[in-house]
Image: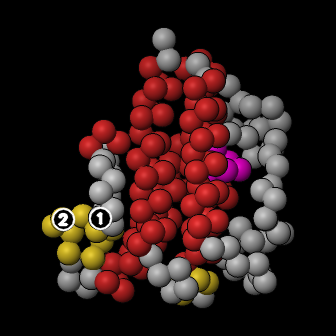
């Protein structure tokens, strides 16, 4: 039985929904610690792409240039939100396919040339994606007085085009 893998898959899907909502709701050019928010979104997505499965057996996306994943590094490359969302779609598809290929026992193993177990990689990305989603949502809340919709369980999510959940208006 792959009970842990199923739980991981069921709980990683809301993480992807939440960062997707953040990208749809944020001011991409607003500065956060000196870098535009879109750079932080790319940083989070790139990390999920690279570190969720095996960072030591990884091929950069075709649009990536050295240092683009580090918001502190200046870059002439500018990715559109459409490119970021398309990249997120690819990451989500690859991640869910990867999870479907695992057994619970494999979570305790280290991928080839990796010093972390698969479970450690998964947990690190849960933390990292959630951290940066919260960071982006904080920027949105400061700018708009509203916090973007947050999904805890995929089954409770209905994409009705509303980016800001009801009863989520905060004074900032």
Total marks in image: 2
Name above or below for residue 103 compared with residue 171.
Answer: above
Asked whether residue 39 is in view, the answer is yes
Name above or below for residue 119 compared with residue 29.
Answer: above
The residue that disc 2 covers is 166
Q: Position of residue 104 (x, y in %)?
A: 55, 20
Q: For residue 49: magenta?
A: yes
Task: Please name the residue shown 71% across and 67% down the image.
Answer: 69
Image marks 2 and 1: residues in contact by CB distance under 8 Å: yes
- Residue furthest to the top in view is 1
The residue that disc 1 covers is 162
Quarter of the figure with residue 43: bottom right
Task: Please name the residue shown 80% across and 55% down the image.
Answer: 60
Q: Position of residue 7 (x, y in %)?
A: 42, 30
Q: Position of residue 6 (x, y in %)?
A: 46, 26
In the rendered structure, which segment of residues is drawn in magenta? Answer: 48-52
Q: Secondary structure at mark 2?
A: strand
Q: For residue 21: magenta?
A: no
Name the magenta segment's main secondary structure: helix
- As measured in the structure, the alpha-carbon distance from the residue carrying label 2 to the one carrying label 1 is 9 Å
């Amino acid at each position: 039985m792959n009970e842990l893998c199923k739980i991981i898959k069921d709980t990683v899907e809301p993480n992807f929904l939440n960062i997707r909502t953040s990208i749809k709701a944020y001011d991409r050019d607003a500065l956060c610690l000196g870098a535009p928010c879109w750079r932080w979104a790319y940083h989070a997505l790139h990390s999920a792409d690279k570190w969720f499965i095996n960072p030591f057996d990884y091929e950069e996306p075709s649009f990536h240039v050295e240092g683009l994943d580090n918001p502190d590094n200046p870059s002439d490359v500018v990715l559109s939100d459409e490119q970021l969302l398309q990249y997120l779609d690819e990451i989500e598809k690859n991640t869910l396919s990867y999870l479907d290929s695992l057994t619970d026992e494999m979570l305790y193993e280290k991928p080839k040339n990796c010093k972390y177990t698969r479970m450690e990689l998964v947990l690190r990305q849960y933390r990292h994606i959630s951290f940066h989603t919260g960071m982006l949502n904080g920027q949105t809340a400061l700018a708009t007085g509203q916090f973007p919709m947050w999904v805890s369980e995929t089954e409770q999510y209905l994409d009705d085009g509303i980016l800001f959940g009801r009863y989520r208006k905060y004074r900032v």
